[in-house]
Image: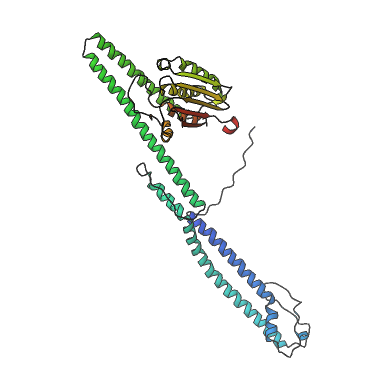
Amino acid sequence: MNRASAPRIPRIRLPGGERGRLTALYGGLLVLAGAILTGLINFLVGRGLYMTIVTAVAPAELEPGHLPDTSATFTGSALATRVPRDQSASDSLITFTKAAEQAAQSELLTVSLITLAVFSVLSVVLAWWMAGRVLRPVGVITRTARRLSGENLHERIALDAPEGELKQLADTFDDMLDRIEHLVGAQKRFAANAAHELRTSLAVQRAAAEIGLDTRDPEAVARIRRKLIEVADSSERLIEGLLLLSVSDRGLDHREPVALDELARAATAEYAVSQQARDHGITVRVRTTPVTAHGDPVLLTHLVHNLVGNAVRYNHDDGHVVVTAHGRTLEVTNSGPHVPPETVPYLFEPFRRLEERRHTRGEGAGLGLSIVASIARAHHAHIHAEANPGGGLTVRVTFPTPEARS
């Protein structure tokens, strides 16, 4: 049974923008401090004012014992009344002292109130200026954010200010703009490359169909037929790869325990007897220990197959592929051409290849590692690649523990 939630107390918000609220806050605190200081000064001065005046105006010949005693007092809004114990004190001195005390307190109160009023005005003006100075970086961030679009994502705030919370906010905003610019650029390249790949396949199919329909040679027709089927298969793989990339980018709908070691052994057995491995003499080996990852079994199957398939496809004659599963890490190492270390991070972008596409049979569309990276992100896994000194690439995918993932 759900407990009824307690009613939320509405928060009181001052009207106006943040500058007005900060002005009210700063100005109110300053005025309150001034009022407390004024009251404290009047209180402390009033307590010793009577004796100060008596001491100042009493005749020098009066002995200290003849001075009026101020121990008998009563308080209130009226001035304190003191009754001298020694009747030999001059009545005129008492009257004069009381009058001087009242006049001094009245003058002190008047001056204090005037000073407090002037101080309040200056406090509000100073608070308004101070709030503007504090919020200036926020205004710079706001204007930059309004000015940004897809055409000027290269602009940055580059706030010139001392280290502090607002400086950290501006630097964080600049870092976010770096990531957005990178993502937008990658998206533009992805759309352009996808359009180019699909347009190329369609152009090849159109040319092959036109040539094939313009001849009666059976061998030429058979050759064109094989070419059309090959291009259609390539286009189908490209579309499937794009759909898989889109699905993995959306994240996971459900999770379940998946045995990565079994997926690694199945993929290794499949590619070890593949046509490409046999034609080029590529050896595919596997070393596994029980490894379990929580995720989507279909996506994880594609991850393992893409890693092993890439390692076989981008290899050389008599090369090797080693698939290892241990702990929570899946590692695929292959021989192959030399990979410049500075190009390794770009291999995870869609349609990125180490070499230009030659449109040969069995050539991939350049989506393998980008799909692997997308599936790894969906599973909160860490993916790392490094170039091997003797050529080829090593790719590691480390899956988080259930506790770390949650």
Determine whether 40 is above or below 370 in the image.
below
User: From where the camera sits, is residue 267 visible?
Assistant: no
The image quadrant where one finds the N terminus is top right
Q: Nearer the viewer, residue 141 or 263?
A: 263
Q: Residue furthest bottom?
A: 61
Measured from the top left, where is residue 88 in percent x and y?
Answer: 77, 88
**Render colour scheme:** rainbow
Measured from the top left, where is residue 43 in percent x and y?
Answer: 66, 71
Residue lying at 28% horizontally and 21% vertically, measured from the top left: 204
Q: Residue furthest front?
A: 390
Labels in figure, total: 0
The image quadrant where one finds the C terminus is top right
Residue lying at 68% horizontally and 84% vertically, measured from the top left: 56
Determine whether 25 is above or below 252 in the image.
below
Measured from the top left, where is residue 230 in percent x and y?
Answer: 33, 17
Residue lying at 26% horizontally and 10% vertically, measured from the top left: 219
Residue 276 in the figure: left or right of residue 82? left
Q: Nearer the viewer, residue 197 or 336?
A: 336
Q: Nearer the viewer, residue 215 or 11?
A: 215
Q: Quadrant of residue 104?
A: bottom right
Determine whether 36 is above or below 10 in the image.
below
Residue 313 in the figure: left or right of residue 327? left
User: From where the camera sits, is residue 108 visible?
Assistant: yes
Residue 257 in the figure: left or right of residue 63? left
Measured from the top left, where is residue 192 in percent x and y?
Answer: 33, 32
Q: Residue furthest top?
A: 218
Q: Nearer the viewer, residue 215 or 69?
A: 215
Residue 145 in the figure: left or right of residue 401? left
Residue lying at 60% horizontally and 32% vertically, measured from the top left: 403
